[in-house]
Image (spheres, rainbow, N blue to C red):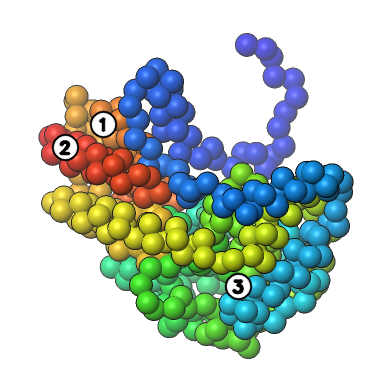
Amino acid sequence: MSEQIISLAARMSQIKPSPTLAVNAKAKEMKAAGADILNFSVGEPDFPTPDHVCEAGKQAIDEKFTRYTAVPGIPELREAIVRRYKEDHGWEYDADQVQVSCGGKHGLYNMAQALFGPGDEVLIPTPYWVSYPPIVTLTGATPVLVPLDEKDDFDLTRENLSKYVTEKTRGIILNSPSNPTGAVFSAKALRLVADMALAKGWVVISDDIYDTIVYGDEPLAHILDVAPELKEQVMLSNGVSKSFAMTGWRIGYTLGPKHVIAAMNKIQSQSTSNPSSVAQRAALAAVAGPQDFPGVMKESFLPRRDYIIGELTAIPDVTCVVPKGAFYVFPNLSAYYGKSYDGKVIEGSVDMSAYLLEKSFMATVPGAAFGADDFVRFSFAASMDDIKEGMRRLQEAIANLV
Ligand SMILES: *Cc1c(COP(=O)(O)O)cnc(C)c1O
């Protein structure tokens, strides 16, 4: 090993490696060695990008649309996003209130850099999406985790929220439907957030990346419908990664007050510049074109959701909130913590995921990665055959614990 001469920045000590990495690395290693691994750890739709979107990308290449574009994205795409929001929700934005970035995650990163700094606290309902705490930490601000209760269907309540509010609170990050739970926030919870935000001047960040994958007939409650008067304090984060199965194209977008978008554009201009010109043209076809694709995916996810929920809750002492959106289930397997296999005790979700991988050849993500150690995340963006076999293996694995 070579001697380490150059030291890392102090901030690196504040960021932990993701607990998912160990399981993922192991799964890859086993797969490479020929094991029949069922993968329930993926965070993306199991659909190819629709043809008309791919064609638009190809056409952009054929036309040599391959140079720098405007930093916040091509005007046609920003205008199409504005029209889509107006048409779908009735919300009014101007094109200069939109930033297109290299994925939804990058938009959230730009936003946090533009809004937060040392001394600020940002509320993060927990279980949270893995990237929210580090994105906040990297600004120098403090992520404040607000635990949600499975018994409340992971909804926010006055009791859990008010405990974590201080004079330093600057904002909150909402994700509904949620990755990892699939839960959605009720209109009542959103009203509560809106009232606090109005009283204290918070920013409310609404990560709506799964808003087209919502099950059932009830429309998704949204902070801007519940509290239109809050609009100047709301940042919308979205993108085409999940809705159009475009994770690899790296296109996300943010809508919000003009001065915040302008600040985010400054950051983007000094870091990535514009997102890929070709990917922007493809995203334009997705946003401006026919909108049936997310519905087609949803129809196909629904029977898989129902099947996996049925099988999970058939296991004694396992509970699982029925996801109202997205494509994840988040069963509580903690009744089996403390049990053993091969003389090894399962202490928590990381051990449980490791056990399922080692003995049952199935990759999952431990709840610890989302700040909720009682749970394990399964993605049902997998084939029905894999889900059936996976649930059989899970039931067997649980039954084998002593
Ligand atoms: C997938 C995802 C995103 C955005 O992902 P990108 O690939 O960067 O567009 C944002 N938030 C959540 C909760 C997600 O699961």
Residue most extreme to the bottom: 229
Disc 1 crowd rating (10 Å Cα; few below 14, some 14-19, many 20+) is some
What residue is rendered at 51% in x and 40% in y? 18
Q: Given the image, on which type of amino acid does mark 1 rest?
A: Ser
Disc 2 crowd rating (10 Å Cα; few below 14, some 14-19, many 20+) is few
Residue to which mark 1 is pinned: 360
Cα distance, mark 1 to mark 2?
A: 9 Å
| Mark 1 residue CB less than 8 A from any atom of ligand 1 | no
Q: Quadrant of ligand 1?
A: bottom right
Q: Nearer the viewer, residue 166 or 224?
A: 224
**Mark 1–mark 2 CB contact (< 8 Å):** yes
Residue to which mark 3 is pinned: 204
Cα distance, mark 3 to mark 2?
A: 44 Å
Which label is found at residue 396?
2
Q: Quadrant of residue 209?
A: bottom right
| 6 on left or right of 298 | right
What residue is rendered at 45% in x and 81% in y? 187
Going from the N terminus, do you reach mark 3 or mark 1 first? 3
